[in-house]
Image (spheres, grey):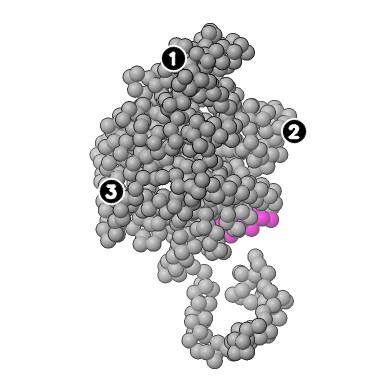
Amino acid sequence: MSHTVPNQYRSEAARTLRDLPKVRTSVTSATDNFNHNRLRAYGEIDTDRWRNWARDVKTHTLTNLDHYLEQAEKSLTANGVHVHWANTSADALAAIREVVSEHDLKSVVKGKSMLSEELGVNAYLEELGVHVREADLGEYIIQLLGEPPSHIVGPAIHKSLEDCQQLFHEKFGTPLDGDPDTLAQAAREALRAEFLAADLGITGGNFLAADTGTLALIENEGNIRLSTSLPRVHVAFVGIEKIVPRLEDLAGFVQLTTRAATGQPIGNYISLIQGPQHRDEVDGPEEVHVVFVDNGRTNLLADEEAWEALRCVRCGACLNICPVYRQTGGHPYGWAYSGPIGAIIAPGILGLKEAMPLPYASSLCGACTDVCPVRIPIPELLLHWRERAVEEGLAPKTEELGLRAYTALAEHPQLFSIGGSLLRKLPWQRGGRALPVLSGWTQERDAPDPSSRSFQSMWKDGIK
Amino acid sequence: MEGRDQVSARQQILDRVRAALKDRQATELPGPFQAWRPEQPADTPVDGFALLLEAAGGEVVRQPNIDAAAAWLTEFTTNFDTATVGKTVPSKLVPGLESSPPEIAPLGVSMASSAIAETGSLMMNARDGRRSQLLAPTHVVFVHARDVYATFHEALSKARDDLPSAIGLHSGPSKSADIGQVMVKGVHGPARLIAVVIGDD
């Protein structure tokens, strides 16, 4: 499939539902698993205390971010790590170009990194003639298919076993009914050769402890450990909001993130990276680079409400629980971060106009905020961006007109009552869908018949 | 490399952060994370470690002392031709097999610097060698019972003063559910992880 932009959300969501019914089946089944496991994992701990602690550490760090960024830079530099700063994706790509050309690097293995998706690292390096291989199994599958990730944690959850069997049959000649173990073994062999040949490893960063300069990475497959251990150079792209103050804070954040993401007490592999190979060590990269990326994050930080979204640890729990995301998976959202969290950070990173209509891709049910490990008030922030969209003339005109008409009616009780009785008399099932304002609503939803009596009259009689 | 553009990008980012925070109330840093939970899953750190690692698909062997662990290893390695061995593995625990490069070895033998009960993790130190911890399909890791800490927080506190270039926490075999949401083992790292906990007898 082609890569789309958020502005195409409505048509892409409709297209997915209409033309790709298997996507909904796969995404629903995968997110059901994630939800089931998260529920169990949250049940084993005093979740409220964990989440309050994590929220408060992140809030403290963000309200002192300049201090912690400088401290992290100092620690990293003392550890022998090269630190780069990137205002924009262009700056970040320029940083990696410098590293690639200085060392004449030819072949990359990558750990799964949503930030690198946001920056467009793969396409850029391929233009430079560098071979890029996604090494996370899910990322590898969608790289072979030429698709973007559909989920922050499970990039290929929209693909069924049959989809993978077909792909691996074409790619490796595995049987069309090959079981997942056979397929994984074929991928292991192909990717092992690439790990051993690669001269550059690229990763993101889940967290970075300011006091020791420790970069923390969470995974289950071992591809990140390999990407940060075998190639002679390692480059990590790290969003400026990823910092935590103390090394020991990683204990809480790593555990909470994996419990929220997959329901595991911890990922099977956690990398805690201080820097390049020490003199008393037998292997490891000769050079480590950390690229601190802003790319719109300071826009979010400056917003009096939306800055709370910067606490996000990218666990994907809000996607898994979201009744809107679960219908289509991530592709219709048109950029790296889908679901509820994607909708509230897109306006900061892409710009509000470019992010439209993502803040509307929600029923505001609030399930996302109930599961969020850092208690981001997602529905409030969706409403915040909707208000901003109205202010900036980006919201659908019908919404503005409708709200104005409602305001006028609500200020005049008699008009309100007359208007209400008129609406109750409309032939909803037949004609309601044709009303200009409501057709947008009813094309995706049923319009039930209204009650025969108004709330006011029921209230007067005492509601039964 | 860190030329004028870099200096200015750094300054621009810090300036924007400071401008954004100008009227924002700074909050206090909370105390340490404490693994709050209604009940502890096990009575002792070694029991907790074994419970969690086994739940994640790892295997746990307990031996009373280093000689017993060495005897177990001799028995275990009869099915292997060669092995790759970590640099910090004590000589008694180096298997009597021909040594082979990590890239082709069927077995990796490592020494963990510590372990964590709370998460069922082995703390692997880069000083032991990273390739020998990652490339072989079967991985045997020794850890002393006295080095099994109750919490991740405690293990990090102890590690803080002598950090290597990298620490890897291994808490189960390499696994993935990316193919049709079916769990498979041994995707990139070892498919089998065996922790041998050595007592102090």
**Of discs 3 and 2, which sits in the foreground?**
3
| Most foreground residue, A188 or A210 | A210
Marked residue chain, label 3:
A
Q: Secondary structure at mark 2?
A: loop
Q: Residue flagged by tag 1: what amino acid is it?
A: Pro
Question: Which residue corresponds to the image point at 52% horizontal and 38% vertical from the top-left?
Answer: B42
Q: Quadrant of residue A165?
A: top right
Question: Which residue corresponds to the image point at 69% horizontal and 39% vertical from the top-left?
Answer: A161
Marked residue chain, label 1:
B
Residue B201 x, y percent position in the rendering? 47, 19
Q: From this viewpoint, is residue A39 visible?
A: yes
Q: Pointer 2: residues within 10 angstroms few (<14), some, or many (20+)?
A: few
Q: Which residue is mark 1?
A: B90
Q: Which residue is mark 2?
A: A177
| Most foreground residue, A29 or A428 | A29
Magenta region: A9-18
Question: Which residue corresponds to the image point at 32% horizontal and 27% vertical from the top-left?
Answer: B162
SS assignment for the magenta stretch, majority? helix
Q: Which residue is mark 3?
A: A66
When the figure is inspected, residue A62 is found, relative to residue B63, above or below; the finding is below
Looking at the picture, do discs 1 and 3 lie on one chain? no
Q: CA distance from mark 1 to mark 3?
A: 46 Å
Q: Residue flagged by tag 2: what amino acid is it?
A: Asp
When the figure is inspected, residue B130 is found, relative to residue A34, above or below; the finding is above
Looking at the picture, do discs 3 and 2 lie on one chain? yes
